[in-house]
Structure formats: structure tokens, C-alpha cells
Image (tube, rainbow, N blue to C red):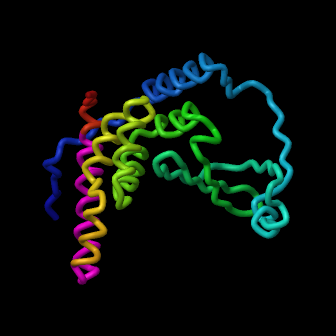
Amino acid sequence: MAEQTNNQPQREEPSLSELLQIRRDKLAELQKQGQDPFRITKFDVTHHSDEVKDQFDAMEGQTVRVAGRLMSKRGMGKAVFSDLQDGAGRIQLYVRIDDVGEEALARLLGDNPAFSVFATALVGLIPNCAASVVIAQLYVEGVLGAGAMLAGLLVSAGVGLLVLVRANRPWRQNAAIIALLYVIGVFWGLVCNALGVVF
């Protein structure tokens, strides 16, 4: 059998020492911000995810403390959705920037620039002009990077998406157009991040 060769340049994986240095730099940044992950703290859990879901109406207005692992996070403008998994199951969290502050949201989005590109492009699909205003404002405030801002604004079609869906009846064609918009925005946002483009 002939051996197949891949003509694409292989991306070099960082060495163990480089990975350790990256982790140490992140640790130093957290400690500089007064958030030492090695400090012994106590977090009193009041409920588990299944209890919150089962007794949601009865718990409305109460403070509930759950702990677990964040399995996913999706940014939507000035809000973030996350899935938290604990020993009892999984629950979806909704976090508004007005409730937690812009610094906390900036940390959440800044920790994963690729995630912020995908999430901001999704926000750009919201069919109104406010989405592009929010994206631009978050970029100016330093919450979003250049790649995420570019992805969101490239995808943003404003009310044009509503006109397209209403005037163009074949839903598959509309879905293909919207998906293509999203893919193009994400692609150029990721390229912008990879090249380190800053405006």
C-alpha cells in the first residue's frame, strides 16, 4: 500500500514546558486580580440541579447556591447561557451582564476568543439593528476582541433577514443563506484572531 502524504503544513503542538508556562501565566494573572484558585475557600451548596428544576416555582425569588462544572457557555450580547453539571444532573444558567458586571462577562468571553467569535456571530443573526449596536459597544468597551466584533458585524443583516424570510418562501434556501452568512462571519472572525489583527 502506498503511504499517503498530507500536503498541508502540520501545526506544531506546544511542548509540555510551553503548556506549563501558559498555565503559570494564567495563574499569575488570576492571582494579580486577587482570585487565587489555590486559596482554601468554602462554598455552601444549598441545592442540587435536579432539586432546582423540580421545585422551580416554589424557589422563585429565593437565593439558590449550586456548584458543579461548566459544561458549555454561549454568549448572546449582554447575556450568557451556560450548562452546569453537578452530581444530580444538569441545569441551564442564564447570566445577564447587568447582574454580574461587565468585568465578569469580559473574563468569561476573554478566556476563550474562539468561543466569543461563534457567540457574537450568533448574536449578529438577530434580525434587528440593535444587535450590531450592542456588538460595536461591547468591542469599544473592550469586552469583545476584534475577531468577535468582526464576526458579529459581518453576519449582521438587520431587518433584511426578516424581509428575506418573509419574501422568499423556500425555507431551505433561506436556511442555506443564513448558514452561509454565519459561516463566513465565523471564518473571518477566526482568521482575524489567528492573525492577531487589532483595530
Left or right position of 119 against 61: left
Q: Main secondary structure of the magenta part?
A: helix
Quadrant where the C terminus sits is top left
Residue appearing at x 36%, y 44% in the figure: 133
Residue 60 vertical position relative to residue 131 in the rendered view, above or below = below
Left or right position of 68 against 194: right
Count of labels shown?
0
Residue 86 vertical position relative to residue 43 in the rendered view, above or below = below
| Residue 143 location (% of width, % of height) | 45, 34
Left or right position of 27 against 180: right
Residue appearing at x 57%, y 19% in the figure: 28
| Residue 3 location (% of width, % of height) | 17, 57
Residue 11 vertical position relative to residue 82 in the rendered view, above or below = above
| Residue 112 location (% of width, % of height) | 45, 40
Left or right position of 5 against 42: left
| Residue 195 location (% of width, % of height) | 24, 33
Q: Which residues are magenta?
A: 168-191
Residue 47 drawn in magenta? no
Q: Quadrant of residue 2?
A: bottom left
Quadrant where the N terminus sits is bottom left
- Please name whichever residue, 12 or 117, is drawn nearer the observer in this view of the structure: 117
Residue appearing at x 55%, y 34% in the figure: 102
Residue appearing at x 42%, y 37% in the figure: 138
**Name of the residue lying farthest toward the top:** 32
